[in-house]
Amino acid sequence: MATNDTSATSGMNGTQPESNVDVLIIGAGPAGIMAAAWMARMGLKARIIDKRNTKVFCGQADGLNARSLEMLDSLGFGDRAWKEANHMIEICLWNPDENGIIRRSDRVPDTPVGLSRLQQSTLHQGRIERFFLDNIKKYSNDTIKVERGVLPESLEIDQSKVDDHGAHPVKVKLRFLTEEEAAPKQLGEARFLMTYERAGAGETVHAKYVIGCDGARSWTRNTLGFELEGEATDMIWGVMDIIPFTDFPDIRCRCAIHSATHGSLMSIPRENNLVRLYIQLVEVKPDASGRADRSKITPELIFNAAKRILDPYKIDYEVCDWWTAYQIGQRVGTNFDAHQRVFLAGDAVHTHSPKAGQGMNISMQDCYNLGWKLGLRRRIARDLIEFDNRFARLFSGRPAKDILDAEGVSMDEFKEAFVQGNMFACGLSVNYGPSNLVLKPGDAEEQGDGSTVAPPAVAVFQVLNQSDGRPWHFQKRLPADGRFRVVLFAGDIHNAQQKKRVEAFCAKLDAPSSFLHRVVGRDGRDGLHSVVEILTIHSAKRWDTELLRDFPEVLHPFRRATGWSYDKVYVDDVSYHEGFGDAYKNYGVDKERGCVAIVRPDQYVAWVGDLEDFDEVQSYFEGCLVLKEYTNGVYSSVAVDASEGAVATEGISIAVR
Amino acid sequence: MATNDTSATSGMNGTQPESNVDVLIIGAGPAGIMAAAWMARMGLKARIIDKRNTKVFCGQADGLNARSLEMLDSLGFGDRAWKEANHMIEICLWNPDENGIIRRSDRVPDTPVGLSRLQQSTLHQGRIERFFLDNIKKYSNDTIKVERGVLPESLEIDQSKVDDHGAHPVKVKLRFLTEEEAAPKQLGEARFLMTYERAGAGETVHAKYVIGCDGARSWTRNTLGFELEGEATDMIWGVMDIIPFTDFPDIRCRCAIHSATHGSLMSIPRENNLVRLYIQLVEVKPDASGRADRSKITPELIFNAAKRILDPYKIDYEVCDWWTAYQIGQRVGTNFDAHQRVFLAGDAVHTHSPKAGQGMNISMQDCYNLGWKLGLRRRIARDLIEFDNRFARLFSGRPAKDILDAEGVSMDEFKEAFVQGNMFACGLSVNYGPSNLVLKPGDAEEQGDGSTVAPPAVAVFQVLNQSDGRPWHFQKRLPADGRFRVVLFAGDIHNAQQKKRVEAFCAKLDAPSSFLHRVVGRDGRDGLHSVVEILTIHSAKRWDTELLRDFPEVLHPFRRATGWSYDKVYVDDVSYHEGFGDAYKNYGVDKERGCVAIVRPDQYVAWVGDLEDFDEVQSYFEGCLVLKEYTNGVYSSVAVDASEGAVATEGISIAVR
């Protein structure tokens, strides 16, 4: 604080510093820090700025669906969130009986059974951000830090350079805010985390890529001239975070409560006996402009609405952590990127009602995908909006009085939509359309609409390590370290015919011309297992099988420093302590013949084929990775930084096509 | 380092500072830091000193049995160890076949199935110490730190004060070592963690209690004039931590290998492809003094012995992290405490061969018990020694050639002893004899000999939270926070007769004269749930049951700040995602009638009785806690600090009798 003078001087002397960066991330909410986490894991030179000078302390998003928890787990800190969060196990549906009194009409599991080893949970956004920041610090060696109180002032794209992937075509001017400018008004004496040495100064950053994660009023989106499209509805809802005193018996479950005439309420139990209530305000209506007068909405008004909905149960509170009100509306961006050099993610391209707990989850998922591969993104945003639209209408609708009540919402319809919608909301049925990273038949327009419930690409079935018998949820062997994985379901390795098929596949995999020997690893060293890892699951009995005797060496490579790899070959067999995962059956793989799958760095299955289809595996990696050429027994070196279509990183190189 | 001069001066000017402390812990190995962790959790004023100036970097203990993992979990960091450790799932037994060639003769699970949700694991002692230090820092608000390079110079007990529990009868003079004195010779350029400001100075500490955890050559034990009793054998073993290159197929399992004529070997797989080998050195013999000449033992000699035992399999290595050799001997202390004011724990009172992986585990268990209640300790040490003696003889013995070979060890006998011994070694069958904390019938001398396999007092069976349906391993609801717990197995709460029994028990529990209203909590505030927590598990269907409607309020007390407690009442019912724990059946409790159990702060069951036996519950707590008096509707205040028999702490008060 004493350095304000110095900073002002350096800001005024006109010598604005310039710098280069691989990726500049604008906004440090859930989307931005997820992008930064990938950059840290992949060793990219990245910066992340935010105009706010503190992280979040209360309110805001708090739901973590099963897929988000799996993502956090793949980054290495799912266990921290799982340990602290409130697990939401059960949803209770409450509806009016024939006398108009609310009754529990159904109970369903919050996370559909069998899809994930993790369940929908709630935890304050500030804690989740803390886990991310610790993770980013660890993997970036403290080189990537959130720079707070920093505002972008201009953004220009040099279109002559956008096809040169080694270039830095995006120029962003930054300004470092003063203490007064950066303090959020509502926080009063906030904790100041920003660097005041630079207050008032500026900097010009030249970036290869920019990711705009700066929220619903995105400066990045506005600067690019893009818009959010969509309309507000006339549905007004209030939100309160309270510690309730109530005789309502399901207060620690997630409840969807439709009252006969007073509107609806959703309760979300949280940590420390907190409960978030979403409360429909049926008495508040938009004015002629289509907007509600928010100045008339008070905590008393909201809580009285909650009391009417919950009657005859009583509810009271002393502690209210946070409250707000919102008008339901779904909007989606007109554009998601500019020249594949500036990308928008999170609320900057899709806003929607918060009740489904999707804001933070989808924002994180946006950047979990974007982080490792800048592209492949529009479909999921549109799915979300479609889902949300349907969900909001059903949820705010008055319950149908009977089957002839056409205006009311049928509770059967609601339950069905809720259960199916919840399958989407849990994050496990998002289904990317075909592209060069997801090879599958079918029309892109028809796929990925979120209406068919597909299991997660790589689910959670248990296998045993061949060498030591330890049971693993196979997903735990797919950490988010930027590697692609080829999973060889080797089948019954003791069947002579099958063993020949495995050996033939491995011979091609291990040939000098194989992609495996042509990937470009860190510092030019052998890329084997540093860009693409080969994992094996066989279906013979573990006790009859030996790693070195029964499997070609490419499946458990030897290194001088560490000996043979004992963490690559797994078996679908019964464990001593954790039962039987029955992974072949659950994955739908033939126990005799097996198959081969390519798994992307974000755990989605990109391709599945037979052991004879090595050429397709080779084509896949030729299509999306930068490979050395192999001619007449000689590998060409690849000048990765300058090569067309390559993002060179410390650990990996991925073509952006 | 630059402050040596200053420190020397302050040491020489003669004004030696004096200070008071509740507990002084001498030695910061596994036993000492476990004691310090309890002190931190219970808010005691404690110090922990160690003459070494660094923590452990390689070698030493590395086994964590299931019970140790449960202890770490109860302290809050079992998950960190479990995540990093190598899990040992399977033990392979190898023995000579009829041609003298080693063959795998059996496979058994390393941790007996069904006893714990955690399995025997290996992790470097330095990491485990790191987890402890982080935990101690957190719970002591950084007030308890390991003071390194500090040596005790004298210890005196003022016997006139040992019965005054508020007194500080133990006087220990400390000296702060200089850099040269504190550096372990073998480490070379070690990391210096000690405070050189004080180097050369002294301090006099007055302690209520002292715990000597200073190892096999314990200064504390020697100063008290106590000894270790026992004899060395003529069995010499070498130990090596290597990354092996081998075609031995079970190298990632724990193996016990008896060769026909070259001795025995045990392999312990560890993290990062390391393996610890314990190798019998049949060619090395003790001299006339009974001691082996250790100068003749080299890594080459040890490794050549390993090669001979493993033949015809090949083994080689490039990296050896650590090696040592030892002569097997079991010794146990003549005394375990002086005046119940100075206690010895860990290697200071029992040394033994390291192969069973017991050193660190038993040392931690010593202080897990001692930490919350200074006493009740001799039996477990003696059990360990008896077990170890038998184990060592069997393990070092030559395999019997046939049934007539009386000198050889029968492999059937070995397997039986191994499996049963392993039940002890996994830490779950330790069985304390009767005392005023463990009320059970029987002769103290006959109990707790480690030969009967008893399940852990409070095992791991899954129950559901009544309010939100979340599945919990019940043990997770018993964290090591110093609280006793009364567990009410309420049975079928919807049976009218049973409900009356529950209500009658609760009425006594909630009466003004009940121990529950007479315990002394932190800062004199209501002790309810701060010293004794009441937990309930009922056996009715969760869906038929409501917390507020069906259970007396003492089972889910209301607080103004947080509302009703939703974390006290559980149900033995089927979960959505995690199956059925069948806890009543597994705990052996009648599903209709239930029972009541008292669980000590270290998770052992102290007493089990009927719902009609409230008076026994009352007697138990009158016997071991300091309670306020209740007469004519008035509670007397207790001057805790001065009261006879009380250790007053921030959070709790426990009589030491």
Image (tube, coloured by chain):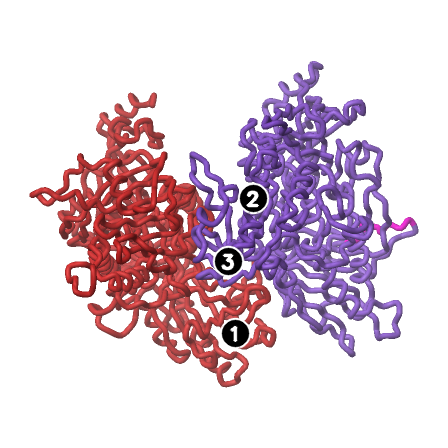
Chain colours: A purple, B red
The relative height of residue A133 versus residue B404 in the rendered view (above or below) is: above
The answer to whether the residue labelled 3 contacts the one labelled 1, judged by CB atoms less than 8 Å apart, is no
The C terminus of chain A: image quadrant: top right
- Disc 3 marks which amino acid? Ala
Residue at which label 2 appears: A506
**x, y percent for residue A394:** 80, 62
Q: Secondary structure at mark 2?
A: helix
Report the mark closest to the observer, 3 or 1.
3
Which residue shows up at 50% across the image and 74% down it? B538
Looking at this view, is A442 or A187 the one in front? A442
Residue at which label 1 appears: B552
Residue at which label 3 appears: A540
Q: Does the magenta portion include A293?
A: yes
The answer to whether the residue labelled 2 contacts the one labelled 3, judged by CB atoms less than 8 Å apart, is no
Kindly indicate whether the residues beneath marks 2 and 3 are on one polypeptide chain: yes
**In the picture, residue B513 is in which quadrant?**
bottom left
**x, y percent for residue A455:** 67, 57
Q: Does the magenta portion include A463?
A: no
- Disc 2 marks which amino acid? Cys
Which residue shows up at 41% across the image and 75% down it? B588
Q: Earlier in the sequence, mark 2 or mark 3?
A: 2
Between the residue at mark 1 and the residue at mark 2, the CA separation in whole angstroms equals 66 Å
Whether residue B130 is visible to the viewer of this picture, yes or no, is: yes
The relative height of residue B590 versus residue A298 in the rendered view (above or below) is: below
Which residue shows up at 24% across the image and 30% down it? B15
Between the residue at mark 2 and the residue at mark 3, the CA separation in whole angstroms equals 18 Å
Between the residue at mark 3 and the residue at mark 1, the CA separation in whole angstroms equals 55 Å
Q: Secondary structure at mark 3?
A: loop
Report the magenta residues as a range.
Answer: A289-297
Task: Give the numbered dot on residue B192.
Answer: none
- Disc 1 marks which amino acid? Pro
